[in-house]
Image (cartoon, rainbow, N blue to C red):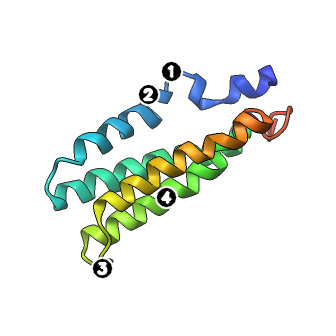
Amino acid sequence: MSSACARQDLASQRIAWLLWGLPAVALVLGAVLDPAPRTAVWTTGFLVAGVSCVANASRCGRVHCYFTGPLYLLAAIATLLVGLGVVPLGWSWIAAGAMGGTVFAYVPEWVRGRYVNARVLGG
């Protein structure tokens, strides 16, 4: 692991709780809400986490973020569509897909390392 990549990794900085911790707590707590507030909470939580992952993948090359960024953005779209009644999908499918996808996103990190390359992208 490159120390330069680690320094650029938002997940290793204090702001990580705001970018991923707070959305995760909101998603868990939002599960007990009625559909309308759940739609707002989950869409926002997935959107914040997804944009943060995409930014982190671009910033430092964190491997799992290349997978979780698009996954969370798709989950935000799915949540919005389910909440609006456009798609007849159960809330549990969105939650299971996001959780399962997150676990699977870490597998490449365990196999090949935490970062895509040793140099800081854009630096």
Question: What residue lies at 29% left-to-right and 61% top-to-bottom?
Answer: 91
Q: Amino acid at mark 3?
A: Val
Question: What residue lies at 22% left-to-right and 54% top-to-bottom?
Answer: 38
The image position of residue 18, as x and y in percent, is 42, 31
Please report contact status of discs 3 and 1: CB closer than 8 Å, yes or no: no
The image position of residue 39, as x and y in percent, is 26, 59
Which label's residue is closer to the chain start, 3 or 2?
2
Q: Is residue 65 left or right of residue 92?
A: right
* Rendered-image quadrant of the C terminus: top right
Crowding at dot 3, Cα within 10 Å, few <14 / some 14-19 / many 20+, comes out as few
Which label's residue is closer to the chain start, 4 or 3?
4
Circle 4 sits on which residue?
Answer: 73
Which numbered tag is attached to residue 14? Answer: 1
Q: Amino acid at mark 1?
A: Arg
Circle 2 sits on which residue?
Answer: 17
* Rendered-image quadrant of the N terminus: top right
- Could you say which is closer to the camera, residue 95 or residue 70? 95
Circle 3 sits on which residue?
Answer: 86
Crowding at dot 2, Cα within 10 Å, few <14 / some 14-19 / many 20+, comes out as some
Which secondary structure, mark 2? helix
Q: Is residue 50 left or right of residue 35?
A: right
Distance from Cα at disc 2 to Cα at disc 4: 19 Å
Which secondary structure, mark 1? loop
Distance from Cα at disc 4 to Cα at disc 3: 17 Å
